[in-house]
Image (cartoon, rainbow, N blue to C red):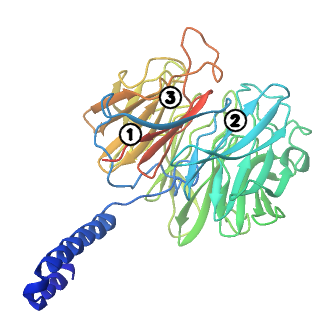
Amino acid sequence: MCWISAKFICRSATAGSRLLSRVGIGLLVLTCGMNLFAAVVRADDWTQWRGNNRDGHWNETGVVNELTAENLKTVWRQPIGSGYSGPTVADGRVFVMDRQEKPEQAESIWCFDAKTGQRLWQHQYPVTYTISYTAGPRASVTIDGGLAFAVGAMGDLHCLNVADGSVAWKKNLNLEFRISETKRMPIWGITPSPLIYGELLILQISGADGAAVVGLDKNTGREIWRALDDAGQYSSPVLTKQAGKDVVICWTGEAIAGLDPTTGQVFWRHPFPPAQMPIGVATPIIKDDQIFVTSFYDGSLMLKMNQQEMSVSEVWSAKGPNERTTQALHSIISTPIWIGDHIYGVDSYGELRCLQASDGARVWESLTAVKKNRWGTIHFVSHGDDVWMFNEQGEIIIGQLTPQSLVEKSRVKVIDPTTVQLPDRKRGGVCWSHPAFANRCIFVRNDQEIICIDVSQ
């Protein structure tokens, strides 16, 4: 349409206005080109844990294919306190949580301008930790419309107005659902990130009296439903489809369960009891009608969802005799990635592995992506044919994961590891927080700062 309009202008122009027509044509072509570029280049937010769909997929276009020291562009950096909470991004704003110990113990929810890093607001509240690994909040802030939902490590739940950080409503989940009182508080605290489903806020909180998982009215905080009496766990719930119905998949400290997100009805529950302690941190990953989970002590489990009725069956499971001699995948912090017929993830001591999804058989193992350490961690994000990997040394690796090997295209250190999350001086610190990939930038944090890296072409 743009070129047809330009041709019409040329034919209708008089000799005296040819110069103006040429200028007009140039502007028109430039405008059309810009419009075409805008149509081709896609920008996205990162509104919750592991992206908009909670699946670790990054769909933006117009980003670099390799990231090196030469093209690394750090746009801004801001000091923050410690925390495992990964950043989220929505409508030009970046959200993250941290913890301070002085002058008093407190957690904060921060909001920054995504382009400039300007501090827009901070909401701070006092909280005393009685859990292990006290670096700070675990869950990512979930953004829905004009509201931000944040859960602290001790169960302080806040619904804040995105515009100014004012409190829309708040709850002390620990007190209301008697988590510590009934000794149901996980030793690492409340970790799962809030999940929005329509008008509901779904939380996995380890509450007593059948409130391992709860559904609240997102606008008021009023309890709508509660489900399961299982022990607590650290994995975030995810949504999927089964037999034509929406299902929220929850991995508790005792089982994997499929719930009706509207009512909390338990569609099915598959026991997966821990041998030593609940230690499932990785998010369940789903492909077609199969669900895969992996735990540091208890190895791997693959379930198949029946698409004719609300039930599941076990496809395979694999567990080694201990945390060093493992089978399939014994992951802890890293959520694996499923590509084609294979699953790629990090084992208990940093071994990057490729598994056959059909039976869990190991295809290959590599020790090049992250240093060999207990709880070695990589966060995987797929982008087209590439996978962007953020390892605990603060490096971004861009490459491809294939049934043959890891094909590394580039690697660059983007942020320094810090020792608050894991005070092991010999290790030299870790970066365990999941980055956000949004607006053709990477937003990454450690226990001292949050930074924005421009990765646009």
Residue indicated by mark 1 = 388
Quadrant in which residue 16 is drawn: bottom left
Please tell me which residue is depicted at 83% across the width and 54% down the height of the picture: 170
Real-space Cα separation, disc 1 to disc 3, in angstroms = 14 Å
Query: Which corner quadrant holds the N terminus?
Result: bottom left
Real-space Cα separation, disc 3 to disc 2, in angstroms = 20 Å
Residue indicated by mark 3 = 377
Quadrant in which residue 232 is drawn: top right
Q: Nearer the viewer, residue 159 or 378?
A: 159
For badge 2, the amino acid type reads Asp
- Disc 1 vs disc 3: Cβ atoms closer than 8 Å? no
Which is more foreground, mark 1 or mark 3? Answer: 1
For badge 3, the amino acid type reads Thr
Please tell me which residue is depicted at 81% across the width and 37% down the height of the picture: 185
For badge 1, the amino acid type reads Trp
Answer with mark 3 or mark 2, whichever residue precedes in sequence.
2
Residue indicated by mark 2 = 98
